[in-house]
Structures are given as C-alpha cells and as structure tokens.
Image: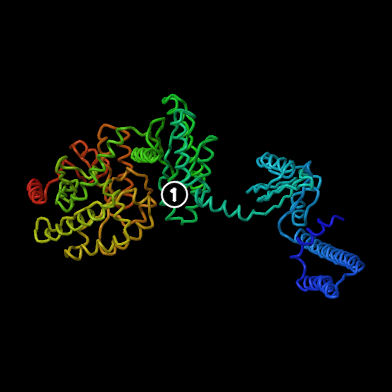
Amino acid sequence: MDRNTLIDRLFRRLEGIPRQRIWLLGIGLSVLMVELLVAPIGFLIKGHVPVDYLFTGLVTAVVVASVVLWLADRYLQVVAQQNLRLQLRMQHVIFETTPLGVLTLNAQLQVTRINPAALHRMKALGLTMQSTLADWWHPDDLPTVRKHLLQLSLGTGRLILQNQRVTGPAGGVIWVDLALSSLVQSSGSGEGVLLILTDVSQRHEAEQAIQKLAYFDALTGLPNRRLMQDRLQQALASRQQGEGHAHGAVIFIDLDNFKTINDQLGHQVGDRFLKTVAEALGRSLRQGDTLARLGGDEFVVILPELDTSAAVAALDTARVAKKILAQLEQVLGQAYPGFSTSASLGVVLFRPGGPDSDELLRRADIAMYQAKAAGRNTFRFFEEAMQNEVNQRAALETELRHALSGQQLFCLYQLQTREVGGVCGAELLLRWRHPQAGVLLPEQFIGLAEQSQQIQSIGLWVLDQACAQLALWQTQPLLQDLRLSINVSPVQFAQAEFVSQVLQALARHRVPPNRLCLEVTESLIQQDLESCVRKMTELRGHQIRFAVDQFGAGHSSAADLSRLPLDQLKITRRIVQRLPDDRQGIVVAKTLIDTAHNLGLEALAVGVETDLQREQLMALGCSSFQGHALGQPVPVDELAQQLMVRQLALG
C-alpha cells in the first residue's frame, strides 16, 4: 500500500474519528518519540551512541508507526462501512415509507425499481413494471416528459416538471410534479434517471376550483363577464393583427319577464329556469362561438368567425339570432307553459379598427332595448341612429332631474262623460314644459323616469297634486262629486310603501278616498298578479277605486281580472281609433266591452275623436267615453267652465 495515500486518507478522515481515540493515538506516538529522542541524550552524556541502538531504534519506530497507522486505517474502514450501512438503511426506509413516488429508469427508460407509494398509484391506474412511457403519461404531456428523460439518461443534470398527468389503462388521471435527476456511473456516463413523483391532484383541483370561480358562472357553468371580455378582446386583437376572419358579432340577450317567474315561483325555480336557458342557448350555437352569462337574466354570445363581407356576416348573425329565439320559445314554452317567456336580442357586428370591447357591449345593450321596445321576442341590429337616440335620452334624463324642482311639470284635466252626456269623472294628465322642446307628453318621458328611478318622486308629486285638487273641489258645489283618476307606474306600484303613501296623501288633504281612482296597466297585472291582488284589496278596504288603463293592449285573462277589486276597464285608444270602419276593430271592441260587462265593470272608451266613433261604441254597449270629441285636456281653472258649459247644454 502506498504510504502517502494511506497517510492522506488518514488525515482526511481524522475529523470522523472519536476524539478519545485520537488522544490515545497521539499519546502512543508521543511516548515513542520521547523514547527515541531522550535516550540518545544519555548516550551523548556518556560520550558515545551505540550503533546497534540507532539501528534497533529506527526499526522499532518504523514498525510501531506502521502498526499504528494500519490500525487507524482499519478502524476508519470499519467506521466508514458502518456509516455506509446506516446510510443505506436510512435510504431504504425513506424509499419504502415516503408518500412520494420514487422510480428509477435505465438508459432505455424502462422501470428498474419502484417504491410502494409509486406502485400503489401504478396499480390504481392499471400500470405495471412493463408499461411503457406511452402508457404512463397523458398524450399532451408525453412529448415533454420523453424529451427530458432521454436527455437526463444520457448525461447529467436535474430538472423539475410541474403539473404533469399520469394516466393508465384503468382510466383516471393523477396530477404530479416531477423531480428528475440523472443516475451517473463511476466513469461519469449516464446510466438512467431517478424520478420522484409528488401527487398534486388536490392542489390541481383547488386551482381549478379557483379558476372556475374567477372565470365561470357558478350557477350555469358558463364563462362569466370577465372571461367573456377576455375572449372578446382576443377576437378583436386577432383582427388588428390581420389574423382570423374580418367580421365577428356580439349578441346581447335579455330574458323577458324573468322577474315574474323568480318572484312568483321562487329563486330555486328561477335558478332552474336560467339553467334551462343556458342549455337551450348552447344548442343554438356553433363550435367556436362563446356563450357567457353576465349575471341575472343577461347572456352574451360572441360569434368570432363570420364572413369578410359585412352583408353576409349580418345574414349569418341573423340566422343565429332567429335560431336562439326559436330554441328558447320551444324549450321555455314546454317547461313553463303558464308564463309569457321570451327574450330580446341586441346585435352588433365588429371588424378591424372598430370600437373596443366595452363599446361593443354597450352598443349591443342599446340594440337589445330597441328589441324590447319593438315588442320583445325579437332582435335588432345596432345602428348609428340608435346611438343618437341614446345620447338624446341621456340628455333628457339629466334635464328631467331638474324638471320637478324647476316647476316644469304641470297637470291638465280631461272630462270623462256618459252616454247621455253627463260627466262621470276626470283624469289628471301629466305634462312636462321642456325649456327647449316645448310641452312633452308622458309617453315621451315616463319610461325614462322609470328607468332612471325618478318615477317615485314624480309619482308622489302627481298623487299629492290629485289629492290637493280633490280637497279644493270639495268646496266647489259644481265639482265636489267629481272623481279624479291618476295613472300609477308599475315601478311606483311595486314599492313596498305604496299603500301607505296613498293613504297618507289622502289623510293629509282630508279627501274622501272614493273620489280617487288609481289606473294600472295590464302589464303590471301580468308581472305580479299576487302583489296586485294584495295591495289593491287593502286600498279597496279604504274605498279607493281602480281601473285598468289601455285594456286590450295586453293579454290579461278574465280569470285574473276577476280576482282584482276593479271598477272600470278603459278600452285602449288603439282599438277605438280603428272605429267605425275597421270590421275587425269592431269585433275586438265588442269583445272588450262584453268582457267588462261580464265582470260587472264599467267600460270606458279612451281616445274618442269623432261622434261616429262614439255612436259606434254606444251601439256596441259602451256607455262611458273620454277623448277630444268630448272635451280637450285643460288646466284646472278651465275645467269648471267646461263642466258648466256641458251642464247648460243638457239643460
């Protein structure tokens, strides 16, 4: 054995030797060296050193040192073997008990060793030691894993791959993070790969759940507003870069009368309704289209791949819109036969260089409201004229906020007469004296007031004006028996405090409640019949009267009307204007008048412009009328004069 090598090894391992044994070895060597050094001193004193001592001492020193060094080296070997066995035992325990999957592959990427944790997962997936890489890994992950395994099996290095999928013949997927390390021979060449698999399936599920909450609607599973906007921006960006098709489209979908279903049948039925709608919409679309739920009863469809021709793109979009309407009508009609369920669609096309995603959605929303205004259950394309109208309405809404405080609202009154010429009541008609546009009729601003939530304050002002006027009439013999009708907005009627507000106004002005008649619309009755029955019955208990305005414009059933404490049905102006020449109009008018009589109610025709219309209505059985032929809407101070003239004419 090379002594230099042995000595080097000794010194390299001294740190691992227990301290006591190093002391013993040092003491032994020290005694020997003292003996060798001290004894010659005596010899020097005596004047001579025996030659045999020098030779014998030298040999003894060499022998003793060699024995000591051999014993130390042997001891170090034993200690190293013990440490190695301990390390191997620890590695074996870790290999067998760790929850991490551990495998070794040879240079041919075949499994040579596998621990119990990995074996358990293999068996669960139907894998064996003979399974190939193609059996182990998901097809989408296999190329990446194979490439890195080949590189590491032939060289040196380490690598971590996250979110890889292990599959097997038995089905199922385990998501794992991979730690890969080369197995290197003593010569330095690669002989395989060590794989450590960490099961991250739960982490992946949690990430997917977070992802779903962030980008998908919890109720329907559809993309939410955030993901929809991302996809719309991607579609716009691809066109800016010259990729994809030239045109695309956005369809904004709003469900009609969803609130009625939700309120009357409960939120659970409302949720099922929305799921049914989502499924029906999904069946109406093509592959590659996006369907998203914005929230509530609003959905959006993105058609990213339409023709380069705007005309062809519009035709294709119209076909999709018609298919959506037909699908919803069929599915919802079968699932909810007792409800008027439909949808209104707003459509806008987009192209390179066009507006951004927010503007597109705003335009689609505008077009959707145009579809609602057109009668619902239809679709409308956005046009620039719509934008101008929106701008005008926005300006009008701002101006309307100052109309009440600026005393720009005022009331006119129109008499309601009977067949024989007597007066049975009057209606308060609201007007807005606009600073620039002149006098505006209710149909020009009431809808805007409802949308902007200003109708509550306007409605309360009208109610107060009516009660104040009725109180004043109590002091005038000519007018003290006159009933006064006012229109009630569905938005105002829906307020929880509506009943108390009416009663407080009557009490404040000390008005007999039977002199006030509240007019409601058929749409209000259809939207929430139960609420109408409850509130109207409570007010009827205080002798307040009720009429249905624009009767014939909606689809109220006699059964629904019979549940309400009504006094009068006001036949809509649209039917009256068709008289006396339109035969179908005559039939409809007769039906409406008969309905009123069958329910024991008074039929009053609105919008009577000519004597011929009045005579035709009288022949059909109508006995009460309102219109320009019988009296123009006038300020309150002229109403008494108008009434006096009529009474003088009757003698």
Determine which quarter of the picture holds residue 535: bottom left
Residue 344 location (% of width, % of height): 40, 40
Q: Secondary structure at mark 1?
A: strand
Judge left or right: residue 356 versus residue 476.
right
* Above or below, 319 relative to 407: above
Give the colour scheme of this rendering: rainbow
Please tell me how crowded label 1 is: few (under 14), some (14-19), or many (20+) other residues with Cα within 10 Å: few
Q: Residue at x 23, y 64 (%)?
A: 504
Observer-nearest of 526 and 644: 526
Task: Report whether residue 318 is seen.
Answer: no
Please give the residue where the numbered disc 1 appears in the rendered image: 295
Q: Residue at x 38, y 51 (%)?
A: 527
Observer-nearest of 474 and 478: 474
Residue 644 location (% of width, % of height): 8, 50
Q: Residue at x 41, y 26 (%)?
A: 310
Judge left or right: residue 643 versus residue 516.
left
Residue type indicated by callout 1: Gly
Judge left or right: residue 3 versus residue 158.
right
Observer-nearest of 123 and 627: 123
Determine which quarter of the picture holds residue 501: bottom left
